[in-house]
Image (cartoon, helix red, strand yellow):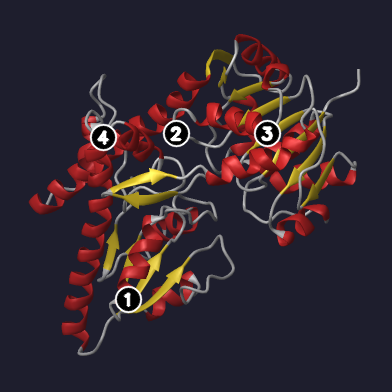
Amino acid sequence: MKRKTICVVGLGYIGLPTAALLASFGYHVVGVDVSTHVVETINQGLIHIVEPDLDAYVRSAVTAGRLKAFTSPQAGEIYIICVPTPFHEEEGIPKPNVDFILAATRSIASYVKDGDMIILESTSPVGTTQKMADVLREVGVDISTIYIAYCPERVLPGKIMMELVENDRVVGGLTFEATQRVASFYRSFVRGQVLETDAKTAEMCKLAENSFRDVNIAFANELSIICANDGIDVWNLIKLANRHPRVNILQPGAGVGGHCIAVDPWFIVARDPENAQVIRVAREVNNSKTDWVINQIRIAASDAAKKIGHKAKIACLGLAFKPDIDDLRESPAVYIAQVLLSEGYDLVAVEPNIQEDNRFKLTSLEEALSSSDVLAILVKHRQFIEIEKNGKFVRDGVIDFCGLSA
């Protein structure tokens, strides 16, 4: 049986892995991205992001002729939208912006025909899938003849290619038939369970999952500040507390980053600010942890300057929002480095997973170790763990905000 053609709109951290994976399952995939650089890179069989195994999937798919990228939509039978959902500040609350989703929906409208599926994977506020249907109706598409559903991604950067297949998926259609059709499609390549619900529940499910994580991280981050004030090793404390059979405290860090956990809770708060009290406070706690980290670095730089008799040089170790990836979106480490630079500190950054960044002076780990007076360890990259094991961080001016030995 001939495989359907799939049009994936948005070839970023989720869209490209999804497109390459589907191609590996025999689908003919056309990918769409507004960036000419991204399109040209993919059509050469190369990738523009760091993700284990993705390069092999893309190279194989392009070579076999099952994946081709374009800067404008192409016809298909299944359309998957994987575009960003940024937010903007409004009355003190970050509000989600679904303009990219609605623009992507309009861009495919002229290609949509009876029997096609339209799937939204972008993390979205409740009601976005219905807004897509409204947009299609407004431009003349008979939405009663197509199948529209929401199916959020649930993957961990660094393990995306595996988790796209192994993780359970939640599919919520605007109609019962849409849920069934789209769920059947996902079962063609997902080994985890494909769970069926309605669109609103699926949208809220993704937000609830990441808000749950945010609340738990906020507890760990708040605990780390309290322990620091009392001279307690928070990493050892957590290790001991987690020996309780019903306790599982997460690891604190420099804050919370990425385009999911640091963003999704605000979607709930924006929709129901009166009742989303714990979710909002957790967001504020995690943001305040980043400000606390900045202040600790200021104090360390001041102490170092007094000892050496001149301005201290600071090295920020890690810029990504989590270990061993190149994704800097919503990264607390980036924010920390930017604030310190804006205040006039002499600062360099070490980020093993990127080649350049025009905001910061990047340097090697070896250079940072030899030339910096304050080393702020912000991300638990494997390269830093190895250095810690070798005892090279045992010196004055080292502040570990991510628990390298934990």
Image coordinates of residue 317 in percent, x first then y, are: 40, 64
Q: Which of the 4 image quadrants contains residue 375?
A: bottom left
**Contact, CB < 8 Å: mark 1 with mark 4?**
no
Asked whether, in this view, residue 29 is left or right of residue 355, the answer is right
Asked whether, in this view, residue 31 is left or right of residue 340, the answer is right
Which amino acid, by three-letter code, is at mark 2? Pro
Above or below: residue 29 compared with residue 2 = below
For the N terminus, the image quarter is: top right
Above or below: residue 386 compared with residue 79 = below
| Label located before the other in sequence (3 or 1) | 3
Residue tagged by mark 1?
Answer: 342
**Contact, CB < 8 Å: mark 3 with mark 2?**
no
Above or below: residue 337 compared with residue 27 = below
Which amino acid, by three-letter code, is at mark 3? Ile
**Gap in angstroms between the C-alphas marked 1 and 4:** 33 Å
Residue tagged by mark 4?
Answer: 273
**Mark 3 surroundings within 10 Å by alpha-carbon count, few (fewer than 14), some (14 through 19), many (20 or more):** many
| Label located before the other in sequence (1 or 4) | 4
- Checking the image for residue 125, the label placed there is 2
